Image (tube, helix red, strand yellow):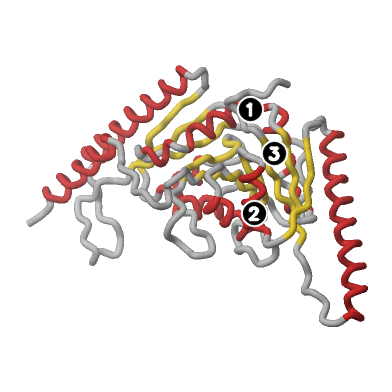
Amino acid sequence: MMHDPSSFRSILVPLDGSPFAEQAVPLAARIAQRSGSKLRLAFVHKLPAPPVDSAAAKLFTSIEAATRKAERAYLRGVQARLREGGTRLSSAVTLTGDPGPALAQYAQEMAIGLVVMATHGRGGIRRAWLGSVADHLIRHLEIPVLLVRPAEGVAPPSRPGAGRILVPLDGSPLAEEALDTGARLARALDTELSLLQVVPPVLLSDDPALPLPSAYDEELTGMCRTQAQDYLDDVVERLHAQGLRASGVAVVGWSPVDSILEVARPEHIALVALATHGRGGLRRLALGSVADKLVRGADVPVLVYRPAGAGTTKTQPSSQVGSRGRLAQRAHHSTAP
């Protein structure tokens, strides 16, 4: 298959020797096959503590040699299974060092276009290093990272589920940065892009003393939703002009994350793709609050992309978002004493 310049140059799958990490392989292989990309498997060898005396040096050398041999054999086994499944264009490498920095350096040197990896969602990162590595790669690489959060102890599926690619938007240029990667995945997986914008209700009062949100202005909220739908229709029209299948819907919701998760069900959605500023939030997982919660809560893979400069520059919203803000201001002023 000829390589499509609009597809990914090569796809990196970090492995740690566990069946859990391997659950990212089927999806990565499918994308690689459909896009003509090279699949690169990477295992990071962590050096043990050096020997304290000459007597332990011989044992240290022997264990190191055996461990590295086992790691190479493991990667060859994964490659063999890939070939049996029809993936011919693959390579495997063993890196040495701290997993996050080692993988980031390798990705930069090899001009990787996409990282696909398993990561823990609910329950944190107690067992595997892959959770913290995902955080490191997202914060240090300017390429998309597709996170698969499989269930513990479940064997990898023979074929990833089909469905649309959900791209949440909020009208900002930053959110739209996920569209290019989403489009490439849609072409590779031969599926449709589904755009979603969650419009928060325009409150009649935002008194912080109230325990629950007050009633909202249905007319102003409806106007905001109409503006958001017009914006999505414009984006869909641009995608259609690129030969892509796409649709978009604006919905009213109190919580963007809950609304996105409600739509992102495995029976309809293959994966969620979104851009993040990669700043703020928890030190351990600085993805931005929405991306963080989606990675932890979604039952489908989540692609997270931090564009160049997104962590340092403030993204300005589009005009339609500004209009929504002015509508919200009008609602607030209309209830002022």
In depth, the one of 213 and 175 nearer the eye is 175
Residue 222 shows in this picture: no
Q: What's the residue at 79%, 74% (across, down)?
A: 50
> Residue lying farthest left?
337
Residue 113 picture quarter: top right
Q: Nearer the viewer, residue 309 or 177?
A: 309
Tag 1: amino acid: Ala
Residue where numbered disc 2 is placed: 119
Distance between the alpha carbons at the discs numbered 3 and 1: 11 Å
Q: Residue at x 46, y 19 (%)?
A: 240
Q: Is residue 181 visible?
A: yes
Q: Nearer the N terminus, badge 3 or badge 1?
A: 3
Residue 5: percent from left, percent from top: 60, 24
Count residues near mark 1 (Cα–Cα under 10 Å), then give few for <14, some for 14-19, many for 20+: many
> How far is mark 1 from mark 2, CA to CA?
23 Å
SS class, disc 2? loop
Vertical order, 318 against 47 (above or below)? above
> From mark 3 to mark 2, how far is it between C-alphas?
14 Å
- Residue 152 at what x, y percent from top left? 72, 56
Q: Is residue 204 left or right of residue 162?
A: left
Where does label 3 land, which residue?
Answer: 28
Dot 3 or dot 2: first in sequence order is 3
Number of the label disc, if any, that sits on residue 2:
none
Residue behind mark 1: 188
- Residue at the (59%, 45%) spot, across then down: 145
64 left or right of 34? right
The residue type indicated by label 3 comes to: Ala
